[in-house]
Image (cartoon, rainbow, N blue to C red):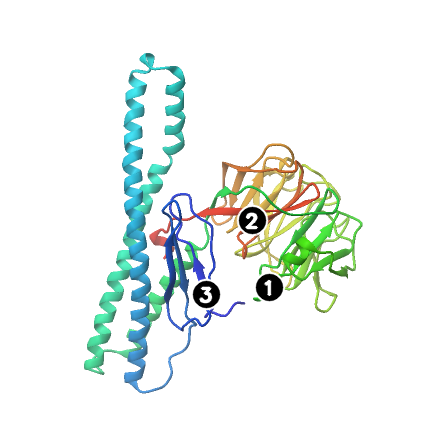
Amino acid sequence: MQPASKLLSLTLLVLMGTELTQVLPANPEESWQVYSSAQDSEGRCVCTVVAPQQTMCSRDARTKQLRQLLEKVQNMTQSIQNLDQRTQKDLQYVQRMEVQLRGLESKFKQVEESHKQNIAKQYKAIKAKMEELRPMIPVLEEYKADAKLVMQFKEEVKNLTSVLSELQEEIGAFDYEELHNRVSNLEERLRACMQKLACGKLTGISDAITIKTSGSRYGSWMTDPLAPDGDTRVWYMDGYHNNRFVREYKSMVDFMYSDNFTSHRLPHPWSGTGQVVYNGSIYFNKFQSNTIIKFDFKTATISRSGQLDYAGYNNRYHYSWGGHSDIDLMVDEGGLWAVYATNQNAGNIVISKINPLTLQVIKSYTTNHPKRSAGEAFMICGTLYVTNGYSGGTKVYYAFHTNSSTYEYIDIPLQNKYSHISMLDYNPRDRALYAWNNGHQVLYNVTLFHVIRSEEL
């Protein structure tokens, strides 16, 4: 686990979002602080916040305790004021955008009424643009409502600061424990708000970034999302069966420009390309079985193994590209997942949340999407995203949300640069997709969008 005093980096995502950026201060103070606040080239807000380490109140004199509470509230006030300033600027931008959308809608209606007098090509172009932008109108309305939440935070902190100031003058006039609970509650709500901004819905994928060209047509490569600071090792596995050797590169630079690596021999060959390295161990599907194995790199031993009941294996329910890809292990912000199919679910995808320590299934979700029809899949923020194929023109077109057990069809292009994707996994620390594309190891940056709702606070 990362210490609570480490930097909590969040991105306030407006309209179509922006990529998460981390800036690590040399000596972060033990208080809420806005470390940087800026706009990107399109006017979207990027806000980096330092989260304090939660500590228990000391048993010092009451005046010292009150002073500490006041300082904490003042720090939160500063954070909220900065967040409010950015939100208000973004709200102005959203309102201008809304006016433009309304105007475009009005123009479209005028064109529609007199379309016989207009050139057919111009009419179709305007109609297509209007249909593309029309879904943004309710989103803009939602964002305006969410901006009011920041104002509520400001008012609460203002009132609490006033009470604390009066209490400093008349010690004993209020119940200290009650006051402490109010401060703690507000702090937790603000923390939850910021954490939720760090997650979101996938809205875009960048062009492929080629890192290296090596290995066969099939394989997998990854980094550990729970690796400690300074650990930038890269893990590399060539092929999809009858292989036990995992390469460890010291860094991404070593992986890109050298052949210096350490080789680890697994006790069993793996199956498919759905392996993940998570918190110092590799999780993989044992060849020709529905067994998941957790292998600890530090001790070079199997620390745990377990079976996925009813999961198809040995090329029974593979992805459309084949390759014994029946069981796909993946990691997102919520932890470890397994994606597979069963006879009981008619060969459709089953998503299971896995306890990384015991390998027991915590909860499973059944979908209506055939496993064999999926090109590849990955998890982001509790949502499974599925591609329509593995070769030629590729896109992410299906999403299943585990938080609501609902699905939707989407249309997010995915550049298939080398025409054969046999592995696609999300790394929540890098906010990037790792892919094996026809003997090329590539990365994709992702764009996430999130609207805060009052029930989430």
Q: In this rendering, which labeled residue sits more in front, label 3 or label 2? A: 3
Amino acid type indicated by mark 3: Leu
Residue underneath mark 3: 7
Where 377 falls versus 101 (above or below)?
below
Residue underneath mark 2: 379
Residue 102, located in which quarter of the rendered image?
top left
Q: Position of residue 387 (x, y in %)?
A: 58, 38
Q: Which mark is residue 227?
A: 1
Asked which secondary structure carries label 1, the reply is loop
Q: In this rendering, which labeled residue sits more in front, label 1 or label 2? A: 1
Residue 182 visible (yes or no): no
Residue at (31% x, 20% y) in the render: 111
Asked which secondary structure carries label 2, the reply is strand
Q: Position of residue 59 (x, y in %)?
A: 36, 85
Where 346 falls versus 337 (above or below)?
above
Closer to the camera, 313 or 3? Answer: 3
Asked which secondary structure carries label 3, the reply is strand
Residue 94 visible (yes or no): yes
Amino acid type indicated by mark 2: Met
Q: CA distance from mark 3 to mark 2?
A: 24 Å
Please, which residue is most extreme toward the bottom here? 61
